[in-house]
Image: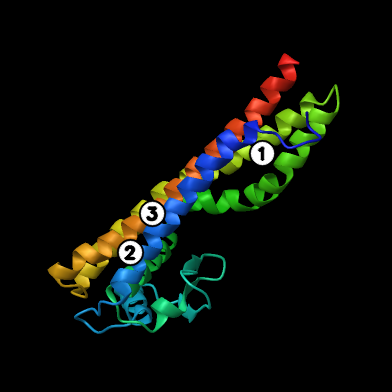
Amino acid sequence: MFYYFDPIYLIFAIPAFLISIFAQIKVQAAFSKYSKMKSFSGMTGAEVAKSILWANGIYDVKVEYVPGLLTDHYDPRFKVLRLSSGVFDSNSIAAIGVAAHEAGHAIQHYERYPWLSLRSAMVPVVNIGSNLAFPLILIGLLFRNGDIFINLGILLFSLAVLFTLITLPVEVNASKRAIQALKLAGVVMPSEEEGVKKVLKAAAMTYVAAVAVAILQLLYYLSLVQRRRDD
């Protein structure tokens, strides 16, 4: 059964696809809506990020432009906060929310936030494991005595699932830090705060979706193993 398309795969793939699409639609809709609303402060995303960093005593983190849509991220390896074209030089409510969120990650790094430290430590293993997991499972399924490969593949992919779970508290905490920092700095008016929160909540949905997709994929792998044992 492993040499042709497995119809059971659709049971897991279709929900995963729908969850991912829903999350992407939500974040793009929220970002698009609040990108058209200029903030009262007039500060750009880059200015907001620098202001938050400096207010927290962080002076060694660079704020740089990165091409693409919603490609914003903080790189702890090089202490660089990268903001996309729709955020770096924009003074919209969406832009300052995203910029503040990424600054929140830099603050986590500076303060050695444990969940961020754990996630960073897992990155090398997860990058290798997520690529090797399915080939190992497939090899194990093709050979009669391949249980060791199957178990190793499932273990490696389980680490990838754990990584997505650990990412959730990191992202939620960064958003909380962002809201607090914006309020303390007086960057957002009370009427603008709701928009910032909606953008950040929509962005958080993508991480929830990633967890759901990873779990569904793991369940599919487990179903392959169970069907092999039943044969």
Compute the Cα span from label 1 to label 2.
35 Å
For the N terminus, the quadrant is top right
Q: Foreground residue, 57 or 128?
A: 128
Left or right, 156 with reference to 90: right
Residue at position x 78%, y 32% from top?
2
Quarter of the image for residue 52 reads bottom left
Measured as percent of width and height from the top left, residue 72 is found at 46, 69
Q: Nearer the viewer, residue 212 or 114?
A: 212
Tell me the quarter of the image containing the C terminus. Answer: top right
What number is the disc on residue 156?
1
Mark positioned earlier in the residue sequence (2 or 3): 2
Dot 3 amino acid type: Ala
Which residue, given by chain and number where applicable, does mark 3 sit on?
Answer: 204
Please identify, in this view, whether the residue under mark 1 or under mark 3 is nearer the observer.
Answer: 3
- Image quadrant where residue 218 sits: top right
Q: Which residue is mark 2?
A: 30
